Amino acid sequence: MKSYAVLLTLCFLIFCSCTREITNLHYDADLKKKACSPSSFLRTSGRSIVNEQGESVRLAGCNAGSWLLIEPWMINADGQPDIETEKDLWDVVGSRFGEQVKLDLIRTHRTSFFTREDVQRMADIGMNCLRIPIGWRAISDPHYGGDLSYLDDCIRWCREFGVYAIIDLHGAPGAQSSNSVIVGERALNELWKEESYRDATVSWWTHIAARYKDESIVAGYDLLNEAMDASMGDLVTFYDRLYKAVRQADPRHMLVVEDGLHGIYRLPHPDQMGWTNVVYSFHYYPQ
């Protein structure tokens, strides 16, 4: 059977603000048991996501928003002079109090804003999936506290409590969008203008895929969040490059391909691209 699926991503994954859905999940013990076996890799089967026993799995959860990429509006830091993005925030701290204080505050934020107890609470109310939005600097740039141990810790917590993790590149090198807030730094979507940034993004994902290729609690990799300023042609071409690079490092995990807010119907059929075990995703914002 062809391996692809369509994931309808509402408000950055499954219904995280809907009390009724969370209440239902709380009492659906059989669903939780099936979906959360840490020993079971997930894969696509037709239009479904299944575990290694071939049982259908419905992923329902939320984001660790503003943890490894701060969107200032989420923490009531928007509207401040000179602070539009996470990088602005840390740059202001560094300019006023020095680099060491900046790095200490970054470390304090990342070790306290989202913790093991949060993953435990997710599991307790029936959530079985955590999407982890990441700015590339958070794990790769030492000048902004880059450290993979934060993601390692989160994957370990997810494994402990049976919550699948989706690793999401929310802010790519050079920025995939001119929406500076969501990519973490003032940006002019340079990812689409400079080959060096695309090379860096491929390298970033290759490193991540090689590191977590044997982690069954990782549901998959969300390759690029809301790349709305790329043309659909450029976006699909780059997705194909990322697909091939990640598959060389990790042939097993699902890959999440977003529509870049262009419309999911504009993505090519996976068979046309030779893609397997992919999940198509769109973000729906009610007006």
Image (spheres, rainbow, N blue to C red):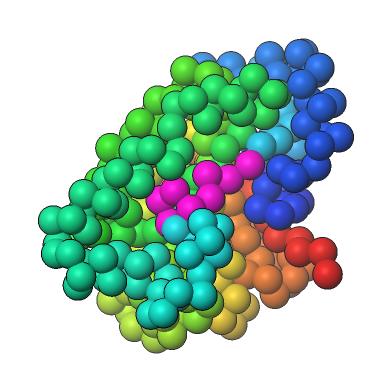
- Image x and y of residue 88, in percent: 35, 72
Please name the residue shown 63% across and 42% down the image.
62
Q: What segment is highlighted magenta in the picture?
A: 62-69
Above or below, 106 against 111 in this view is below
Q: Is residue 144 visible?
A: yes
* Nearer to us in this view, 10 or 242: 10
* Image spot of residue 245 (x, y percent): 38, 55
Q: Is residue 138 magenta?
A: no
Q: Tell me if residue 67 is in the magenta stretch.
A: yes
Relative placement, left or right, of 204 versus 267 is left
Residue for point 82% across, 27% down: 23
Q: Nearer the viewer, residue 182 or 202?
A: 182
Q: Quadrant of residue 57?
A: top right
Location of the C terminus (image quadrant): bottom right
Quadrant the N terminus occupies: top right
Q: Is residue 252 visible?
A: no
Q: Nearer the viewer, residue 2 or 176?
A: 176
With respect to residue 2, does 66 lie above or below? below
Q: Position of residue 219 (x, y in %)?
A: 55, 35
Q: Residue at x 28, y 76 (%)?
A: 196
Residue at 39 percent across and 65 percent down: it is: 86
Residue 221 in percent (x, y) is at 50, 47
* Majority secondary structure of magenta residues: loop
